[in-house]
Image (cartoon, grey):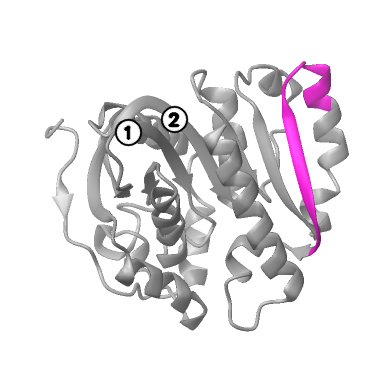
């Protein structure tokens, strides 16, 4: 196991982050749970991965957390912490590892826009390989019972749906306002249930839900989307802001409640 990853020090507030992530930063700083940085080997690459462990006495399922197109920021790490609070091992890889200035990760980009631009250049095959490497490490952790689900948000939501077409031994895929694969043959290869979380005021994504549901039904796959009234894109993050819309706040609460029930099921 030591050959696969090594511990690294936690970093302070990332340069690519803004004041809107203050609630996430506060959660991380006050967390009782054990946080680690793992360096996961993926071919010639090293994927820096944030891991959080629950305070439980038995082995539990792991959840692979795929960040938004903003990279691995405090908010994405706070989701991992919240999953561990609910009783699960959570691993959140920084898929921009090695691609920042001087070979850095998300924390080294001068702005969120710069990180987003870099993310848009990633090779999809490389992303899948990186996720496979993190999954292998997750399953081998002494705290993990070998079971694993995947979750993602926005860009990461699309990647979580795609990963479900690629990995055949997932417990479930949780897609938060992410676009689905377009290839019906890829959808037919999904071996786990897919649960969707979408905002009503997000036509760019939700307008395609009917077609996705029809394609999944045709392939005899489980796809259970929920559209939250009045919520916009990214409500799981924006709902935490001090000036959040009531609809986003309500969607945030309802989505977390649903997600934890599904994980526990």
Give the residue drawn at x 47%, y 83%.
Answer: 19
Position of the C terminus by quadrant: top right
Name above or below for residue 230 compared with residue 193. below
Q: Is residue 153 left or right of residue 136?
A: right
Q: Which residue is mark 2?
A: 148
Residue 61 forms part of the magenta stretch: no
Mark 2 surroundings: few (<14), some (14-19) or many (≥20) residues within 10 A? many
Residue 145, quarter of picture: top left
Residue at the image position 46 percent from the left and 56 percent from the top: 79
Which quadrant of the figure contains the N terminus? top left
Which portion, as a residue range, is magenta?
215-230
Q: How many marks?
A: 2
Q: Nearer the viewer, residue 120 or 16?
A: 16
Secondary structure, mark 2, is strand
Quadrant in which residue 144 is drawn:
top left
Q: In the rendering, at what x and y percent does residue 259 appear? A: 60, 45
Report whether residue 154 is seen.
no
Query: Which residue does the numbered mark 1 point to in the structure image?
Result: 138
Residues 31 and 19: in front is 31
């Amino acid at each position: 196991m030591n050959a696969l990853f090594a511990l690294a020090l936690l970093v302070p507030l990332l340069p690519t982050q803004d004041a809107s992530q203050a609630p996430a930063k506060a959660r991380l700083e006050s967390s009782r749970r054990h946080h680690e940085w793992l360096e996961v080997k993926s071919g010639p690459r090293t994927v820096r991965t944030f891991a959080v462990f629950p305070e439980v006495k038995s082995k539990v399922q792991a959840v692979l957390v795929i960040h938004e197109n903003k990279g691995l920021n405090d908010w994405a790490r706070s989701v991992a912490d919240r999953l561990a609070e609910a009783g699960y091992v959570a691993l959140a890889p920084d898929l921009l590892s090695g691609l920042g200035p001087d070979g850095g990760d998300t924390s080294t980009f001068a702005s969120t826009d710069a990180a987003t631009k870099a993310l848009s250049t990633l090779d999809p095959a490389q992303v899948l390989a990186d996720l496979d490497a993190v999954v292998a490490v997750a399953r081998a952790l002494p705290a993990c019972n070998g079971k694993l689900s995947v979750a993602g948000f926005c860009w990461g939501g699309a990647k979580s749906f795609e990963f479900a077409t690629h990995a055949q031994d997932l417990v479930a895929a949780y897609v938060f306002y992410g676009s689905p694969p377009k290839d019906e043959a890829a959808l037919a290869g999904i071996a786990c249930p897919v649960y969707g979380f979408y905002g009503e005021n997000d036509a760019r994504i939700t307008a395609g839900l009917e077609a996705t549901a029809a394609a999944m039904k045709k392939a005899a796959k489980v796809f259970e989307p929920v559209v939250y009234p009045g919520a916009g894109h990214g409500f799981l993050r924006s709902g935490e802001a001090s000036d959040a819309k009531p609809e986003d706040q309500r969607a945030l609460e309802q989505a977390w409640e649903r997600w934890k029930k599904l994980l526990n099921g």
